[in-house]
Image (tube, grey):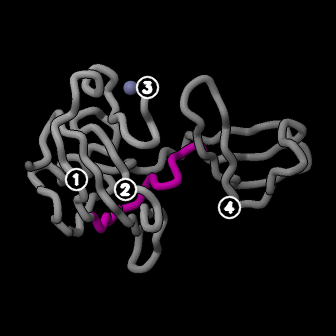
Amino acid sequence: MKIANGCAVSIHYTLTIAPGEVVDSSEGQEPLTYLHGGDQIIPGLERRLAGLEPGAVVTLAVPVAEAYGAPDPTLRVEVPREQFTADVDLTPGAQVIAEGDGEPSVLTILEVRDDRVVLDANHPLAGKDLTYDVEVVGVRRATAAELKHGHVHDGTHRH
Ligand code: ZN
């Protein structure tokens, strides 16, 4: 069947932001499984996957406006240096994970001063055009429970 809202979809994918510059891939792992129409993947990718069938091998270009958007220069945070544990790599360009109330977010270190660390809170892929090489592995109708939960129940997520 073709990918449409309410489908449980499995894909293998490789994400590049420039030729040969791979930032994420399912290669060597289980395929990514998601609920189509469930707001689980970026909208620009979801839209381009609609209508594809199992076996399809495609390259999908998602422009920055439909991916993570332009970086917001005001999304800078300064954190006292003592809040970082000794195992954190405090090098400009390094990424740290902030565990907040919601989803953990990735911050990029911009500058390290004597007492403070300046971080960029933009998504690491903000400002990037994304290219996904995708192979559609499986498409099936989601179950009632999956639709209710808003995610797919597969090998790694079952309850
Ligand atoms: Zn569930």
Q: Residues within 10 Å of mark 2 (few under 14, many from 20)?
A: some
Mark 4, residue position: 93
Q: Position of residue 65 (x, y in %)?
A: 30, 50
Residue numbers of the magenta segment: 121-134
Query: In the rendered image, which quarter contains the C terminus?
Result: top left
Q: Position of residue 155 (x, y in %)?
A: 42, 43
Q: Is mark 3 within 8 Å of ligand 1?
A: yes
Nearer-the-camera pick, 99 or 110: 99
Distance CA(mark 4)–CA(mark 2): 30 Å
The dot on residue 31 is 2
Nearer-the-camera pick, 13 or 44: 13
Q: Residues within 10 Å of mark 1 (few under 14, many from 20)?
A: many
Give the residue displayed 25% in from the left and 64% down from the top: 135
Distance CA(mark 1)–CA(mark 3): 21 Å
Between disc 1 and disc 3, whose residue precedes? Answer: 1
Residue 103 shown left or right of residue 20 in the figure = right
Mark 1, residue position: 138
Q: Is mark 1 within 8 Å of ligand 1?
A: no
Q: Residues within 10 Å of mark 3 (few under 14, many from 20)?
A: few
The dot on residue 159 is 3
Between disc 3 and disc 2, whose residue precedes? Answer: 2
Distance CA(mark 4)–CA(mark 1): 37 Å
Residue 7 shown left or right of residue 29 in the figure = left
Hey, which quadrant is residue 39 in on the image? top left
SS at mark 3?
loop
| The magenta stretch spans residue 36 | no
